[in-house]
């Protein structure tokens, strides 16, 4: 099963979240750079950071993932909502769901299909949540609608996409990387709600340093909309 990928476009992603029942006070905003002066202009509070990065070749990717999971202090609390990516090109939507689902103490979701989906999948495993998403028709329809709204022409569903979205969230004083292709959340050390953006930027820089000649990285944040 494959979806048309979501464009890394804050406007498209924000509209998608609002259709899912996220209140208008929260939006996806551009992070224009990872230096402290550019991070400082992002409105606070920041609830999650999403990185879009180019995917290396398959063999390189498998080795890299093995290393990361081995190195991770896998002490992820049960309170973390982590979902398996079972659908090709769904990584943008999964990164957004990870961002919202792990901030329900702050985001007052409106009654609707996302709230129902998260309530129903709360006690399920990583793999079961991913399987449920394959049949969540309301979320699929909203994704498809949003995927057609970008500035670039949406690629075909079966076209291989060489970019991947991951989310960074704060949970129990730690910074966690959530990736639907990795079997466990990755703990990147301590953070606080106030320093989440700066700490996530540090990890994003590490991703960029793996391929210094690559420029196709995008960072956005789920943050309070500046009035």
Image (cartoon, rainbow, N blue to C red):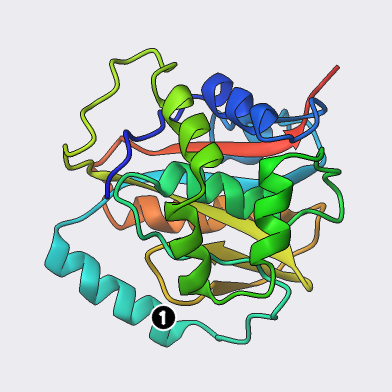
Q: Residue at x 67, y 39 (%)?
A: 222
Classify residue 63 as left or right of residue 34: left
In this rendering, is residue 183 above or below 106?
below
State the residue in front, 198 or 28: 28
Characterize the local packing of mark 1: few (<14), some (14-19) or many (20 or more) Cα atoms within 10 angstroms: some
The quarter of the picture where the C terminus appears is top right
Q: Which residue appears farthest toward the top when viewing the image? A: 151
Q: Which residue is mark 1?
A: 69
The percent coordinates of residue 45 (x first, y second) are: 82, 41
Residue 133, placed above or below residue 182 = above
**Is any atom of residue 1 visible in this view?**
yes
Task: Identify whether 104 is placed above or below 50.
Answer: below
Residue 25, x across and y down, in percent = 82, 28
Instruction: Identify the residue at image location x=40%, y=87%.
Output: 70
Towards the viewer: 41 or 104: 104
Q: Which residue is at the front of the view, 102 or 227?
A: 102
Tag count in the figure?
Answer: 1
75 sits left or right of 162 in the view = right
- What's the residue at 44%, 63% (across, down)? 131
Residue 87 rendering spot, x and y as whole percentages:
34, 53
Element at label 1: helix
Residue 179 seen: no
Percent position (x, y) of residue 138?
A: 55, 38
């Amino acid at each position: 099963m494959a979806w048309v990928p979501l464009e890394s476009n804050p406007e498209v992603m924000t509209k998608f979240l609002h259709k899912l029942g996220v209140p208008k006070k929260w939006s996806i905003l551009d992070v224009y750079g990872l230096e402290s002066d550019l991070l400082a202009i992002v409105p606070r509070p920041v609830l999650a950071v999403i990185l879009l990065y180019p995917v290396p070749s398959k063999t390189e990717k498998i080795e890299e993932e093995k290393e990361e999971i081995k190195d991770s202090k896998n002490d992820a609390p049960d309170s973390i909502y982590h979902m398996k990516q079972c659908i090709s090109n769904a990584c943008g939507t999964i990164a957004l769901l990870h961002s919202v689902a792990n901030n329900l103490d702050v985001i007052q979701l409106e009654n609707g299909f996302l709230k129902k989906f998260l309530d129903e999948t709360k006690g399920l495993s990583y793999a079961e949540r991913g399987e449920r998403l394959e049949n969540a028709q309301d979320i699929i329809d909203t994704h498809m609608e949003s995927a057609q709204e970008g500035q670039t022409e949406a690629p075909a569903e079966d076209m291989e996409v060489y970019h991947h979205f991951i989310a960074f969230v704060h949970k129990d004083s730690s910074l966690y990387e959530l990736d639907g292709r990795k079997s466990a959340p990755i703990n990147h050390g301590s953070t606080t709600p106030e320093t989440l953006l700066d700490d996530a930027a540090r990890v994003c820089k590490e991703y960029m340093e793996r391929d210094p000649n690559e420029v196709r990285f995008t960072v956005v944040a789920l943050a309070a909309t500046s009035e």
